[in-house]
Structures are given as structure tokens and as C-alpha cells.
Image (spheres, grey):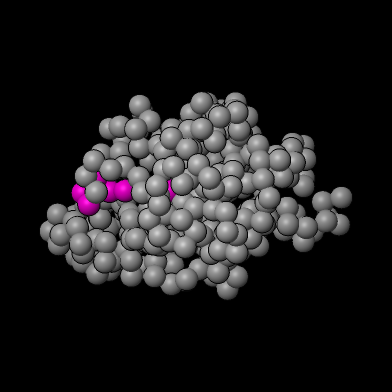
Amino acid sequence: MTHPLAAEIPAGLAAGTLIPYLGPGMLSLVPGGAPVPATPESLAAILTGKVTVPHKIRTRLTQAAQFIENFKHRKTVVAFMSEAFQAAVPPSALHRHIAALAKLPLVVDAWYDNACQAALTDRGDWGQVQGLSQSEHFGHWIGYYDGAGKPATEAAADLWSTLLYKPIGAVLPANNYLVSDSDYVEVLTEIDIQTPVPARVKELRRGRGFLFLGCRFNDQLQRTFARQIMKRSSDRHWAVLPGELSRNESRFLEEQNITRIDMSLADFEATLTGQRLAEAA
């Protein structure tokens, strides 16, 4: 890799001391293009293409989802989300590389697709925990599922070698989605005291760093979730962030001691997975 700290990244991943934190940008690596929405804006466009919403909120995902929830019922939002993400997403080389790490204790995947789940399918020692909407699961913040998609217990999660954490839900196995304003209001009310963060995640993040892949931090929700999931972890983190950063992104990186790797995610994938060893030498 071309970054001076690059050697620490594959070493940390291999040792299990660096936790991958995946965002929707990971879908840009899917061969042939992702068959599901790959940005909040594209998802908002799909939702608002089905229901007329006020023009000023048409590009704002959480507000558009809330409008549909208010006027068409929560079940409509869930149905639209499930339709948008029903297509199976083939894992990218980077998804597969991460899933194959022998000492991978935790992966955070902050989008609704199933690519990371598919990458982990061949392993028998994993399960997942997902954020739940209070409008559908009042009083329950998270749900556990084993590698086969069956409901599991918190105690079972302690035995999994790898835990996949989907903080805003996922299409599989149970169509759980945090997407509307009301969903996030409920979570954000409690997240500062860590109530919605699974106990196992709190345990596994201790002393470990995070590697952000396919994430941008120009949205307050994304920054808030990342900040709270990182809480009480190591004080060293990395993010693959190409191009110009917004002021909020730069401030967030500095605040959280996240070292920026200014290269495209495709180049990072190729280098990490060994596709460009000659270039990296």
C-alpha cells in the first residue's frame, strides 16, 4: 500500500485487533454493479418513486421514510425497503477477504444489504446482531440471529468466533430497518448511554481499532453512530477516504483520531487482497 501506516492494517486485521466498519460505499466494489441501492440518496429516490412526498424532502432518506410511515403506515415502509434490497448481492473480493480472516472477532456493517452475510456463509462459527425499530419491537433494541438466520440468544453470541453487527438493520433474515426519523429519534435518545449497543459489541471493541471502508462522515447520523460504536475502543483508527473531505469529515477524523488513507476503495481492495502486489512493493 502507498500509506505509511499501511503495514499496520493487514497486520491488525490478521491479528483481530482491527475491526472492519463497512458502509454503503462497499457496494461500489460488487462485480457488475450492485443490484440494490448503494447510497442513502438512491434509496430515497426509490422510496419517493413509489409515493408522492413533498419536494423538499425527496432526497432526504429519513424524512421521506417518515412521511411514508405517517401517511401509508409502517408496513408500507418495510415492504418498500424489502423490495429495494431483495436482490442477493454477490460479495466483493474485499468482503470475501474480510470474511476469511481467521481471527475476525467483529464486523460492523452499516447498510441494509446482504453482501457481508453472504461472504460469511461458508463459515459455521458466526452470527449476527441487528438494530431493531422501536415501532415494531418496542422495548427491544437488538435481535440476534445465527449463521442460518434463525433467532438466537445473547448467550449464544458469546460462542461465535465472528459477530456481524448490523446497527441499522438488514433485509436478511427478518427485514429489520432503522430508516425513518422516528426510528433514529428513539435510538439517538438512548445511544449516548449505549443502551442500543449490544453488550457483546462493547466487549469486543475494547482495546481494538476500527478500519472504516465505504463510509463517509458528511452526515450527522453516520458520525453519531460511528462515534458511539467506537466508544471505549482503542485510540487509533483508519479510514479509506478518497477525494476532498468536507469540513465536518475533517473535524470528525481529527476528533476521533482516525488516520485517513487517501486512495480509492477499489485500489485499497486490490492491494489488500493481493491483486496488486507488484504495485504495492
Is residue 252 found left or right of 219 in the rendered image? Answer: right
Name the residue rendered at 54%, 53% in the picture. Answer: 126
Is residue 112 found left or right of 65 in the rendered image? Answer: right
Is residue 130 covered in magenta?
yes
Is residue 50 found left or right of 120 in the rendered image? Answer: left
Where residue 9 appears, as percent x and y from the top left, is 71, 41
Where residue 256 appears, as percent x and y from the top left, is 54, 28
Name the residue rendered at 19%, 58% in the picture. Answer: 74
Nearest the viewer among 272 and 56 is: 272
Name the residue rendered at 43%, 72% in the picture. Answer: 87
Main SS class of the magenta portion in the image: loop
Name the residue rendered at 43%, 48% in the picture. Answer: 129
Q: Is residue 69 above or below residue 131?
A: below
Q: Is residue 192 above or below residue 211?
A: above
Q: Is residue 233 visible?
A: yes
Nearest the viewer among 123 and 258 is: 123
Q: Is residue 253 visible?
A: no
Nearest the viewer among 245 and 136 is: 136
Nearest the viewer among 254 and 212 is: 212
The magenta segment is 129-136
Q: Is residue 162 above or below residue 252?
A: below
